[in-house]
Image (tube, rainbow, N blue to C red):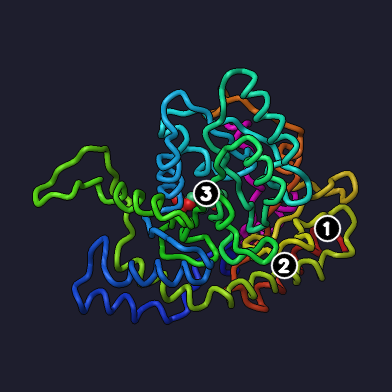
Amino acid sequence: MNTRIWLSSPHMSGGEIKYVNDAFETNWVAPLGPNVNAFEKELSHYLSVKYCAALVSGTAAIHLALINLGVGPGDEVICQSFTFSATANPIVYQGATPVFVDSEDETWNINPELLEKAIRDRINKGKRPKAIVVVHLYGMPAKMDEILSIASKYDIPVIEDAAEALGSRYKDKCCGTFGAMGILSFNGNKIITTSGGGALISNNHDFIHKARFLATQARDNAPHYQHSQIGYNYRMSNVVAGIGRGQLEVLDLRVKQRRENNKFYRDLLGEVKGIAFHTESSDSYSNYWLTSIIIDPKITGVTREDLRKGLEEDNIESRPLWKPMHLQPVFSGAPAYTNGFSEYAFENGLCLPSGSNMTDEDRDRIANQLKKILKF
Ligand SMILES: *Cc1c(COP(=O)(O)O)cnc(C)c1O
């Protein structure tokens, strides 16, 4: 059997280990320390954002963002339906209800018209949404101008889930820096990784200050341990932050490599009828974390599952697009404003292997297999 080609696997540069060694040599093997401080500074600088808190995960970052906005039991939070469950779960951690909104077909992200319709309908029902969670899916920037103008019209803060979009830009500004707060993830499959980790970013000092406080068990300022609020153990470790510092040094290279993979697929499949790519607009620059396509089986004669299983035959991993949250059993009771797009995309869409560490040999194997399945 050929070695497995993964959808997206960790890609170390070699530069990480010196920061990890620093942590060991100075005995900063702790959930704070010089690597954490430096990683936050370097990340803020890269993103041109004022403040950043390094955390254990992107999920923790979303949770703290919701707490910062005062989301609590009985509240409603609007959430993009077409995403990974981690976007929505923290809404439920807070005892609030997610209200799901479907996507538009250009960016595959939250549909601005449907968003406004949902807001008006919730307000008519006496429930003013406490926040809007927008996702930049697979690295593709959402229509931020439209979304922010609706959000400000109704005075509802926006949380940007940029877990998949580090290095992506909208109108030359980094994804994650448009809303009241943005979140990033450094999980093992993301464009850069710390094995596991995340960050909360904002230009609002108070949000990040409060997030750091809550992430370290909400200790009051006293010589003994005193608590006036419920806290969390969400701070990134100084060892892990060392990996992050080394990864950040190659982030631009990783974006370039992912974009080259995207070009490889476009060159390969460009002439094949019935295949549509997830594509950036003139306003946006995607990190193309995962190259994703939607297959029209009536034209190709091949379904999404034919394609996925065909690739699997040569030990090549691919994955259906996210199953929308409004179709998930766990969220079956949540209100949803749908238009059919995310359901269609889920049924017919596939993420192709997109790791920055794929070799020419890997790409040849993928090309051969795709030619075999799609007969071109
Ligand atoms: C990965 C991911 C998250 C969660 O990040 P973790 O660091 O794994 O907790 C949230 N939202 C989206 C869209 C993601 O892809």
Residue drawn at x 80%, y 67% as measured from the top left: 266
The quarter of the picture where residue 79 lies is: top right
Task: Kindly report the distance in space between the C-alpha atoms of the residues bearing marks 1 and 2.
Answer: 18 Å
Give the mark nearer the N terminus: 1 vs 3. 3
Q: Which mark is residue 374?
A: 1
**What's the residue at 33%, 78% (across, down)?**
19
Dot 1: element: helix
Amino acid of disc 1: Leu
Q: In the image, which residues are magenta?
A: 306-328
Residue 201 lies, in percent from the top left, at: 47, 57
Residue pictured at 50% horizontal, 44% vertical? 86
**Residue to which mark 3 is pinned:** 180
Is residue 88 visible in the rendered image? The answer is yes
Q: Please provide percent x and percent y for residue 348.
A: 75, 45
As rendered, which of 60 and 318 lies closer to the eye? Answer: 60
How far apart marks 1 and 3 lie (CA) works out to 45 Å
Q: Is residue 209 magenta?
A: no
Nearer-N-terminus badge (1/2): 2
x, y percentage for residue 350? Answer: 70, 52
